[in-house]
Amino acid sequence: MSQGLLQLTDIVAGYGDVMALHGVSLAVRDGSVTALLGSNGAGKSTLLKTAAGILTPRRGEIAFDGAAIAGKRASERVERGIVLIPEGRLIFPEMSVEENLRVGAFAPHARPHVARGLERAYALFPRLAERRRQSGGTLSGGEQQMLALGRGLMAEPRLLLLDEPTLGLAPLIAQSIFTVIERLRADGLTILLAEQDARRTLAIADYGYVLESGTGVMEGSGAELLADPKINSAYLGL
């Protein structure tokens, strides 16, 4: 496995006495989209939370840009440029769209760039610009996902961890989210993407890993995994 901007080695992690990851290793190359596939309960969210510092691994090493970060708090990892957009969006429903976005720029390195961040978010998601004074809780599910993405980008990330960004969205809105992910990659942002829509994910992924029951069972380029009969049978219904 080649070295990457993010490197996880032999990660064991979970909740209390229940381990959800059993020796998982992966690398996320700088400037790439890396897919994380697996059924519900495979350990995808646990892996992203561990990379973000929300969970502390029981065992294993985590390196970001060559520096060990396994002992760093989540806030310190945000300052280094690692930003998680969790499943479920978790926006602030009583706050306006723009207030939600501004909250994303809490890290010291991002605070001087609020105006630039807002301009970027509104350019990527024109609907947010139209609804900038509207409370987040009144947005549709798709608009809330746009807001969650925009808020994450306000933190000026180098690595974006996306957990099920199209879950529950209408097909056209989901496709627009994938289009934004491709645009972000073209702009040089590195992305680790956990997503149920394996076909669309592998179509845009440079590389991918497959988890089963908290263990890495397969890896390869997006094209290789998309063509693999096991992936077709397990995730694409072919």
Image: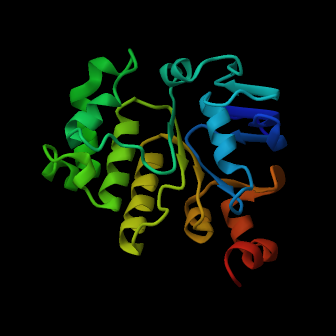
- Classify residue 20 by image quadrant: top right
Q: In the rendered view, does 61 fall on the left or right side of 122?
A: right
Q: Residue at x 82, y 51 (%)?
A: 216
Image quarter of the C terminus: bottom right
**Residue 236 pos. (x, y %):** 67, 77
| Identity of the residue furthest to the front in this view | 16
Count of labels in the image: 0
**Residue 11 pos. (x, y %):** 81, 35
Image quarter of the N terminus: top right
Q: In the rendered view, does 44 fall on the left or right side of 94?
A: right
Residue 111 vertical placement versus 144 (above, below): above
**Residue 93 pos. (x, y %):** 29, 44
Q: Residue at x 51, y 44 (%)?
A: 86
Q: Between residues 56 and 234, which one lies in front from this camera angle?
A: 56
Q: In the rendered view, does 193 fall on the left or right side of 126?
A: right
| Identity of the residue furthest to the bottom in this view | 238
Visible in this render: residue 5?
A: no
Q: Residue at x 28, y 43 (%)?
A: 121
Visible in this render: residue 114?
A: yes
Q: Residue at x 47, y 61 (%)?
A: 166
**Residue 46 pos. (x, y %):** 68, 43
Q: In the rendered view, does 228 fall on the left or right side of 184?
A: right
- Classify residue 103 by image quadrant: top left
